[in-house]
Amino acid sequence: MRIELRQRTEDSRLMVWLSPLLALGLTLVFGTVLFAALGHDPLRALHVYFVKPLTEAWSLEEIVVKATPLALIGVGLALVFRANVWNIGAEGQYTVGAICGSVLPVMLPDLQGPLLLPAVLVCGALGGMAWAAIPAFFRVRFGASEILTSLMLVYVAQLLLDWLVRGPWRNPEGYNFPESRLFEADAVLPALAGRMHYGTVLALVAVAALAIVLGRTLKGFEFRVIGAAPRAGAFAGFSERRSIMAVLAISGGLAGIAGIGEVSGTIGQLHPSISPGYGFTAIIAAFLGRLNPVGVLFASLLLALTYIGGEAAQVSLGVSDKIARVFQGAILIFVLACDVFIRYRLHFQPMRRPAARAEDAP
Amino acid sequence: MPGGNVLLEARGIVKRFGGLAANDRIDLAVHAGELHALLGENGAGKSTLVKILYGSLQPDEGAVSWEGRPTTVGNPAEARALGIGMVFQHFSLFEGLTVAENIALALPPDAAGRGLADDVRSVSESYGLPLDPAARVASLPVGVRQRIEIVRCLLQRPRLLIMDEPTSVLTPQEAERLFETLRRLAGEGCAVLYISHRLEEVRQLCHSATVLRHGRVVGRPDPKTASMADLARLMVGADVQGAGNREGRPAATGPVRLAVRGLSLEADTPFGVSLDDVSLEVRGGEIVGVAGVAGNGQDELFAALSGETPASDDAAIEIDGRACGRMGPRRRRRLGAAFIPEERLGHAAVPAMRLSENAVLTRHGTDPELATGGLLHLSQARGLARRIVERFDVRAPEGDPEAGALSGGNLQKFVVGRELDRRPGVLAVSQPTWGVDIGAATGIRRELAALARDGAAVLAISQDLDEILEISDRIAVISRGRLSPAVPTGDTTREAIGLLMGGAGD
Ligand SMILES: Nc1ncnc2c1ncn2[C@@H]1O[C@H](COP(=O)(O)OP(=O)(O)OP(=O)(O)O)[C@@H](O)[C@H]1O
Ligand SMILES: [Mg+2]
């Protein structure tokens, strides 16, 4: 018996929907084995991890808070990935967005007024865009792979942040902790309810806007054509360079908004660890959501759950909080693996040796 | 007819795509040493059948036997292990890799080691299909790509060679050389299953033939004795008329609608061809044909006309008197021009997108109802796609299928129809009937003639000299990036054109 993959004559519509569910199922199986191996009761552990956070108001709120940056970054990534541009450095754009957005509140703390918050958000978006423009420039000018350049810039951005909060931007009243001064009230994204803030509204707007851009507008069509067949795009009259610049700018800008939104709405000041890896987890959100903005929204909620579950598991089971990363990685692997079945189906075939037959023929 | 043993036999092959039976109980037997033609109009199911024999599709019903033993061909690797080689209708090459690397990928790992480059060179030369193993595929014209696929098959010393329209992109000389090769292979006992829409070459080459229509076998004529008209009638199920020769028509006196003036373009890759001082005028009401051997600057000329490669000087190209050398494709279309490139998958159309989206691809700039204020109107686009499908008799799966699901010739009809439906004032087309069956090819040629008759200027680039002679009022020849002056078709001969194609004009 041999198992092989055979291409389907057309994509399976059923698998498009089933694949993420199947991936979740496999992740749960994987979790069972993992917790058992760590010496925990798997059922209780999975309950703590995946179910309990859904039963309490505060943790539901926290899921929304964590899903917000994921969705903002994730929809931007869905757009670039559709255009066949591989921005892996959203984490860096997030960080630079947070830094640029903090320029006014940190350097001019006396500045107040209703225009401050919009200015802060715009600075954040511009910062993210500028950071994403660097790989875009190297790609269109020199053909450098944006995968490498955008990723390397993540580390540059993180070191920049580190230097700022330990050096020039360190809070004078902060007892030498590596953190900036706190944002004044006018620079803070107002709360919606509890810990949830208006960044969530921005995320929903971004999801809706990109769903329309991708599905209904000529620009979105242009991005998709360039991504699927660049030569056909050039023939249609679309500029590949401009598309690359545009999608990178949009996704960088959204990551920048996510960064400043998190600092202004949730944390209230800059410090070296403003992200538990949102920029990388959002890559998973983009794929789990089928590069479809609405799908990304749901995927972000699910991935936010893995963060909260990880914290809960750390508290009540004493496992490392890195377990969240393990689960996120597992989800990505299972999703990509299950997606194979959209194009291919399994075929079971009795063992035989066609080559031998051809030779022993007369 | 050579009386070899039955090598491959297929019985009752059925393959359905949704509700459509692309193959409907097909029986086929191929003998060793036989050159067997598989004929049929576009969408008849030829490619589907050979893909099944080669293991890249699985039949829903039916059985295959190889040398009298029942067998199933699960995938192409198994087919190759049996001794079946195939050259696909659409290329299956990796553009970023070299010729030798592409060939190595298809060979068993032990055969793909050192010395492959030499093997490639010697096999390709001994069969008259020269190749440079180190060249990168992306930089090669279609004719050469086709050669890679053929050489790749020959290196595996196949016992059955399947060729899906191998000559549609070859020059007559290249095709002639391929026929020698095939005859030689047949003499050595290799069987060849040969798909082509060129009935003349089938009659020259093949010993036997199977004709398909709507997925069924409708006849097994003897190609040596059957006439072209007989074969065409079997394929189409009705008589086929020619497009009418244009020779002897009065010279067009309309205004110059497309002008190229002293256009020179450096090649942008080391393997490209530089255009050297190309000049040409096409008047409203005439078809000017550009003949030439593949890879002599046709692709570059087309890209310069369409605006994909803008010229450095605005005056180098004029459409209806407007200098537009530096405009992109969209603005040129707005001036009333339309373009049809030779490669349909990935250039003229996006295979993974629906027909409606592919209609938007070239029409969004000129058809305001498709996109207003940056918003797409998908229902309008679906309507347009449906109109093209109906008007140009595109046989496509129900609804709004992806372009990749159409048979080769039907996609070509769609791509041509998409532009003709606009009634453009200037049309530049490359290989207008590549892979289109004889009935549809005549239809397309007739449409081109009608477009010219209504006052449009048509420039047709083709490697098919018969086609050029049939449709053109005037003929120019491109050779190594230089274009000869266009002369009236009646004032020139095949020989004169052949000499120019060989570079005698330089
Ligand atoms: N993947 C697919 N999904 C749906 N329909 C398909 C698919 N592939 C082929 N078909 C349909 O099956 C029929 C036969 O197609 P096939 O490619 O075998 O035609 P063909 O005889 O090779 O035509 P051509 O001369 O145009 O290449 C066509 O109607 C085509 O639209
Ligand atoms: Mg075909």
Image (spheres, rainbow, N blue to C red):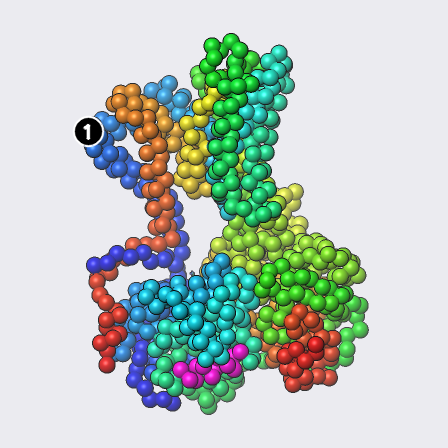
Residue A11 relative to residue B176: left or right: left
Q: Is residue B222 visible?
A: yes
Q: Residue at x 49, y 79 (%)?
A: B128
Report whether B127 appears left or right of B286.
left
Residue B421 to residue A359: above or below = above
State the count of labels.
1
User: Given the image, what chain letter belongs to the residue carrying mark 1?
Assistant: A
Magenta residues (range): B174-185
Residue B253's x, y, as percent? Answer: 80, 73
Q: Position of residue B303 (x, y in %)?
A: 64, 61
Quarter occupied by residue B31: bottom left
The amino acid sitting under disc 1 is: Gly
Q: Which residue corresponds to the image point at 65% horizontal and 42% vertical from the top-left?
A: B373
* Residue B286 position within the rendered picture, expressed as x and y whole percent measured from the top left: 73, 72
- Is A133 on the left-hand or right-hand side of A69? right
Could you tell whether B482 is left or right of B397 in the image?
right
Tell me which secondary structure the magenta stretch mostly adopts. Answer: helix
In the rendering, at what x and y percent does residue A60 appear?
Answer: 38, 23
Quadrant location of the C terminus of chain A in the rendered image? bottom left
In the image, residue B327 sits, relative to residue B36, either above or below, namely above
Give the image quadrant in which the ligand numbered 1 is located. Answer: bottom left
Q: Is A318 contained in the magenta span?
A: no
Q: Residue at horizontal 54%, vertical 25%?
A: A99
Q: Let me know if residue B176 is in the magenta part.
A: yes
Determine whether A293 is above or below B476 in the image: above
Residue displayed at 48% across by 62% down:
B98
Hey, which quadrant is residue B415 in on the image?
Answer: bottom right
In what quadrant of the picture does the N terminus of chain A appear?
bottom left
Secondary structure type for disc 1: loop
User: Which residue matches tag 1?
Assistant: A39
